[in-house]
Amino acid sequence: MSLFVPFNDPKFTTLAQMIYRIQFEKDPVLSKEFDDRRKRLMYADITYNISFLFTAVRFQDEKIFTEYAKWLHELLRSLMKDFTKERVTTIIVDHFRIMKTVIEEEGSSILSQQEISTASSYLLSAVNAVVEQREDDFSESGFLQGDHLEIRQAYLQALLEGETEKAEEIIEQAKSSGIPLLDIYEHILAKTMHEIGVLWHRNIISVDKEHYATSVTQTVMSHYFEEIFSRPRKNKVLVSLAVGSELHEMGIRMLSDIFEHEGWDTHYLGAGVSLEKVMEAIRLYKPQLVALSVTMPPYLPHCEEMVRGIKEAHPELLVAVGGQGFKSASNLWRDWGADYYGNKAIDLLRWAEYPCKS
């Protein structure tokens, strides 16, 4: 059965509300510790937790949920500075145990008995992963590795200080110094935006600052559209999109720009596009390659539907997938019939120029 259950589905909300209520019943102190805002956020987190769990069960991939559990643990320890780290860990562990009990006792309206057993096992693994997580397990972004570090650091600093003109000037000077545009995209802009996401995750910057950095970087990218669109054409076509209602489209936008720069005609469809609309785009543009990006694992079922639908109708058409949503998943893309998986636009470009099965 499909486990992509909408957040507003009555069966889903019943489970979420039950978990929410029981957590406060079992931990009365929590009700005093959490103000109304935190209680609202806690309920929202519960819906995400269930969604990630159901995705892991749907694909029989425990890592999807355990990696998410560790990510959530790190995030909440960063956000909840007025709590001890031990208290945050206790709240999360208790929460996963309550989820396990509720799903075992009340989950049959959504899950089969086998799926309930799998969910229960994954929740136990998540508890163990959180309990055993050490400070040195927390994610290292890789920002300090790679070419053009000084420029990258200067660009990041300008963004953090809100100096828009300086940020734009840093990239323009990098371009004027002879750094190829593709290197600027891959080694400076993409890595800086990934670091911005890491800083938000660690509660070092606000979500407003993250949105500001995204806006500035999109503006910087737009400065090079004339160069990108004026290069010789190769008579090759890319259709690209972000799967699901994604808010984070920067990566797939960069990928589209890079392909356009290298002579492809690209058609970025945006996010939240239906399979029907993708099929229309394929008929209209006749691409050699369709690229699908997934940022959050709960959208993986949508991606599977897209890949299988495209391949069924156009078996000869190359389909590539990528994005953070696949980071904690196994080789799902192979099972779906996709031709390529990766997270670097340059690597996909090289493969697409001389395609072979990965």
Image: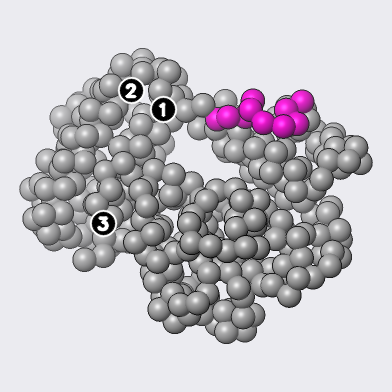
List the residue tagged with mark 3.
Answer: 58
- Which label sits on residue 1? none
Return the disc, 2 or 3, that comes first in the chain's sequence.
Answer: 3
Per the rendered image, the range of residues in magenta is 141-150
List the residue tagged with mark 2.
Answer: 133
Which residue of the protein is positioned furthest toward the right in this rendering?
A: 176
Quadrant containing the N terminus is bottom left
Where residue 23 sits: x, y (%)?
Answer: 21, 34
Q: Residue at x 11, y 54 (%)?
A: 114
Say if 82 sits above or below 349 in the image.
Answer: above
Return the disc, 2 or 1, that comes first in the chain's sequence.
Answer: 1
Helix, strand or loop: magenta stretch: loop
Where residue 154 sits: x, y (%)?
Answer: 77, 28
Task: Answer with left or right where residue 120 lies relative to residue 133.
Answer: left
Q: Do the residues under discs 2 and 1 have CB atoms within 8 angstroms?
A: yes
List the residue tagged with mark 1.
Answer: 74
Amino acid type, mark 2: Gln
Asked whether the viewer can see residue 154, the reply is yes
Q: CA distance from mark 2 to mark 3?
A: 25 Å
Q: Nearer the viewer, residue 91 or 150?
A: 150
Amino acid type, mark 3: Arg
Amino acid type, mark 1: Glu
